[in-house]
Amino acid sequence: MKAFFDTSVLIPAFLEDHEHHERSFEVFAGADKKQDCCAAHSLAEVYSTLTRLPGRHRLSGEQVMLFVENIRERFTLIALTGDEYYAAIREAAKAGVIGGTIYDALIARCALKAKADILYTWNTRHFEQLGPAIVKRLRAP
């Protein structure tokens, strides 16, 4: 069964004190590049988030690159073409998606492109407005 990982699952996999660490790490550790994937832009989201954490939790770019390399080793990276980006944004606009949820729409489009059976996310509510093809794939780890 092919699984797709949202950034909301990747980030807690690396943060031991995160409330979703244990379950996120469990599915992350079981990932196999032949079956599992994530959006290519999730690498940037992981980098951005972990290098801007507050206070003592903030990680250096060098530290985060170790995590990014680990993601690349475990997952096939799925990227959208320019036309696919446009189509995803157009469909999201028609569905009433606004603000940052557009990034979830792009991740959902990548999951469909990858033909994933499961889309692991902690943000199921964000993805539910993206239609039945996405809703049937949603799983919290």
Image (cartoon, rainbow, N blue to C red):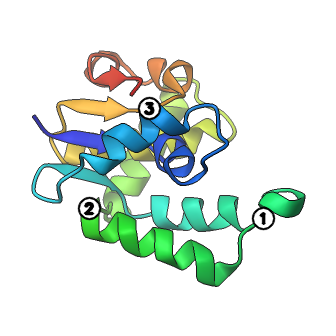
What secondary structure is marked by label 1?
loop
Q: Amino acid at mark 1?
A: Arg
Residue plotted at (35% across, 23% down)? 138
List the single residue furthest toward the bottom: 62
In the drawing, does residue 104 fall left or right of residue 132? Answer: right
As measured in the structure, the alpha-carbon distance from the residue carrying label 1 to the one carrying label 3 is: 22 Å
- Residue, disc 1: 58
What secondary structure is marked by label 2?
helix
Of the image marks 1 and 2, the number of the one nearer the N terminus: 1
Tell me residue 129's x, y (percent).
Answer: 49, 19
What secondary structure is marked by label 3?
helix
In the drawing, does residue 25 fall left or right of residue 136? Answer: right
Of the image marks 3 and 2, the number of the one nearer the N terminus: 3
As measured in the structure, the alpha-carbon distance from the residue carrying label 1 to the one carrying label 2 is: 24 Å
* Nearest the eye: 127 or 139: 139
* Nearest the eye: 20 or 119: 20
Q: Is residue 65 above or below residue 8?
A: below
Instruction: Please identify the quarter of the rendering in which residue 61 is found.
Output: bottom right
Residue plotted at (53% across, 54% down)? 14
